[in-house]
Image: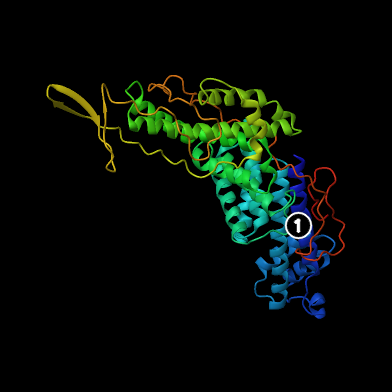
Amino acid sequence: MKKVNRLLALTALLAVCALTAVAQDAQPAAAAATAAPADKQCNDLYARFVDNRKKDQKVAYEAGREYVEKCPNAEAQYVTYVKKFVNEYGKASRKFDLGKAIDEKKYADAFALAKQIVAEEPEDVRTHVSISYAGLMNATAGATSNPALNPEAINYTRQAIQLIESGKTAEEWRPFASKDDALGWLHYTLGVLTLKEAPAEATTHFIKSAQAQSATKTDPSTYYYIATGYQLGDYKRMSDEYKVKYADKEETPESKAAFETVNQVMDRIVDAYARAIASARASNKPEAQAKVTEWMKELAEFYKFRNNNADAGLEPFINGIMAKPLPSGPITPVVPTPAATTETTTTGGTTSTTTPTTGGATATPTTGATTATPTTTPTTGGTTATPATQQPAATRPSTAQPSTARPSTAQPTTSPAPTTASPKPAPTTASPKPAPTTASPSSGTGQGAKPKP
């Protein structure tokens, strides 16, 4: 939660700076500050606005908004000046309220505010990153989560990634360490939000999260989610297809190729679980270390299946996994190798069977049935486990293959929040230069205080 507070403290502080800067913007000519519109009601509203624009900006905002609504025909310089203040204060106030809503876990309110802000500033990276973060916190809130917000969170997160990748930037990235750190968490968030409905897409985002120069690169849950994405996506789809087409049937080149393709997915699952365990062991997160036993069970099941039901070499494999490249990219289906054909000839009462060969080579006569094809199982496409030395029986994986029903999509750690700690942010040169103000960030919740009334 500290990470959220630091994120929101920045939003609040920038809001305070923006509000103060509005009060310092160039005003109409000196005479305009004291002159009054002809209409008495407009005169009173403008006077209240002028009297409070520095000492009580909220009162000034309310008076100014009423003035703009009720006095559109007042002298142009007055209307223009007041309207500018009202617009700027409204924007800053909504951003402040957005941060406060996230801080108080009022995620529905936060999304409503974000919608208003983005309608006014569609390329505001800071707001997109903030509401994406709110989407992650909501999605991982357990029993209090509101799934109805997930579609909007997905859209905002996609937009945030697109804005950053197109060159747009934010005044400040905290509590993330940098733009790259923020991108890592955005991909992580998109993975969490799409895992149930689109596991293959989610896996892609988790892999990007693991490849980013981000805290997500060493977060154990990133790799747990990669394994889960493969299990719920490619592995389940390919395994189900294999069972329908080839289970309990004689092996064919097609069934062998399909089985070897499933092996590729299993090798990636093995790789991901090994990385989750290695990262958890290296971390100082008790909640991640508590998951090692559960993850080890999943890993052992796949590893042993790929290694003749043996777990020899598993610990060294885990210990060295983080030094290896992370497998990525689509799984490449194995192309079936046509079975050899035979010809039977009879000469002088003697029958012989030959296997034709290509390329002009002489056929080799045999004395019995056709020679069996090699049974070694090749592994391709970024495999990680030691390949099996013999092809499993044709009825597998329908009976012995690791289950496709596991694991659950439950959040593996209690806090997937960014782990890079950062001090309380100060105003940056990118924001309007602030004037002295009595408002200051709260030291309790990390949420900045609104300008005092």
Which SS class for mark 1? helix
**In the shown orientation, is residue 399 left or right of residue 430?**
left
Number of other residues with Cα within 10 Å of mark 1, as a class: few under 14, some 14 to 19, many 20 or more: many
Q: Quadrant of residue 162?
A: bottom right
Look at 44% across and 41% down and name the residue there: 332
Colour convention: rainbow
Q: Is residue 180 above or below residue 402?
A: below
Q: Is residue 440 above or below residue 354?
A: below
Q: Which quadrant, please, contains the C terminus?
A: bottom right
Name the foreground residue: 408 vs 382.
382
**In the shown orientation, is residue 152 left or right of residue 134?**
left
Look at 76% across and 57% down and name the residue there: 14
Q: How many marks?
A: 1
Kind of residue at disc 1:
Ala
Q: Position of residue 126 (x, y in %)?
A: 68, 55
Q: Position of residue 49 (x, y in %)?
A: 78, 66
Q: Can the viewer see residue 442?
A: yes
Q: Can the viewer see residue 237?
A: no
Name the foreground residue: 189 vs 13.
189
Q: Position of residue 238 (x, y in %)?
A: 42, 33
Q: Is residue 230 above or below residue 94?
A: above
Q: Is residue 423 above or below residue 43?
A: above
Q: Which quadrant, please, contains the N terminus?
A: top right
Q: Quadrant of residue 135?
A: top right
**In the shown orientation, is residue 35 left or right of residue 223?**
right
- Which residue matches tag 1? 15
**In the shown orientation, is residue 265 left or right of residue 367?**
right
Residue pushed farthest left? 348
Look at 60% across and 42% down and name the residue there: 325
Name the foreground residue: 355 vs 172.
355
